Amino acid sequence: MKQYLALCQRIIEQGHWVENKRTGKRCLTVINADLEYQVAANEFPLITTRKSYWKSAIAELLGYIRGYSNAADFRALGTKTWDANANDNTDWLASPHRKGPDDMGRVYGVQGRAWSKPDGGVLDQLQKVVDDLQQGIDDRGEIISFYNPGEFHMGCLRPCMHTHNFSLLGDTLYLTSYQRSCDVPLGLNFNQVQVFTFLALMAQITGHKAGVAYHKIVNAHIYEDQLELMRDVQLKRSPFPSPKLLINPEIKSLKDLETWVTMDDFTVEGYQHHEAIQYPFSV
């Protein structure tokens, strides 16, 4: 919470106004932010200065792991985060690559599980990383990237959190996640939950201890219609201690994550929070 609140304060004090072409709004913006999450100590980075809907964030991560490309599949897991981008994005609605209602195209998990190869085949990046880590292998390239510029036109949104780099030191697994753009009042809360949970899950299914998750953000911003709520409401509140994330120990493989795991397999313990804040969302 301290590093989250410090970033918000830094944006307000040091940020520059930038016009965002996609949304038509201005953003108060800073460049480069580095956050760390102590997964080994189970200090779950859940925002406490407002109510956070952590189940939706983990459901979205699970959809990425499964390679989903349809907002309806994400809704079935328990999150509506892709409804707007799949169905309300003007450019995507006019795209010849859109297959119909709820179609997201080749974004995020599709790239992670079925990256198109020049020979017409697909590359399953996640499976490769899992296979290596289960064998205790770190080839310094245990990387899963969703950033495929050659297929941007085939999806509703370029990835914001675009690359996850796993590193193995002895029996301890680390994660460095890279994010090109971050809506701090809304998106960061989801993103930090997902970075933490991704490392915890990958350590569990590959038989390692979880270490630290490092989260690097390039462009961190607050939209102009979010600024007053952040400055005058959320930053006036005192944070509570970090809660803990409990994951069903019966989750032992990537296949488990692909098949039977639901939100019932995740529990948050000791979550104290202030009341919710309805920040505007920009499509």
Image (cartoon, helix red, strand yellow):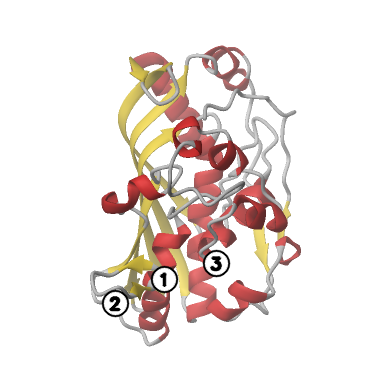
The residue identified by callout 3 is 66
Residue 15 x, y percent position in the rendering: 35, 18
Q: Which numbered disc, 1 or 2, marks the residue closer to the eye? A: 1
**Mark positioned earlier in the residue sequence (1 or 2):** 1
Assess disc 2: are there few (<14), some (14-19) or many (≥20) residues with their C-alpha within 10 Å of its C-alpha.
some
The residue identified by callout 2 is 138
Query: Which SS class for mark 3?
Result: loop
Residue 90 x, y percent position in the rendering: 49, 30
Mark 3–mark 2 distance (CA, rounded to whole Å): 23 Å
| Circle 3: residue type | Arg
Mark 1–mark 3 distance (CA, rounded to whole Å): 10 Å
Q: Which numbered disc, 1 or 3, marks the residue closer to the eye? A: 3
Mark 1–mark 2 distance (CA, rounded to whole Å): 14 Å
Query: Which SS class for mark 1?
Result: helix
**Residue in the image at 72% along x and 67% along y:** 265
The residue identified by callout 1 is 126
**Residue in the image at 52% along x and 26% along y:** 282
In this view, the residue in front, 93 or 107, is 93
**Residue in the image at 35% along x and 81% along y:** 132
**Mark positioned earlier in the residue sequence (1 or 3):** 3
User: Is residue 33 rendered to the left or right of residue 77?
Assistant: left
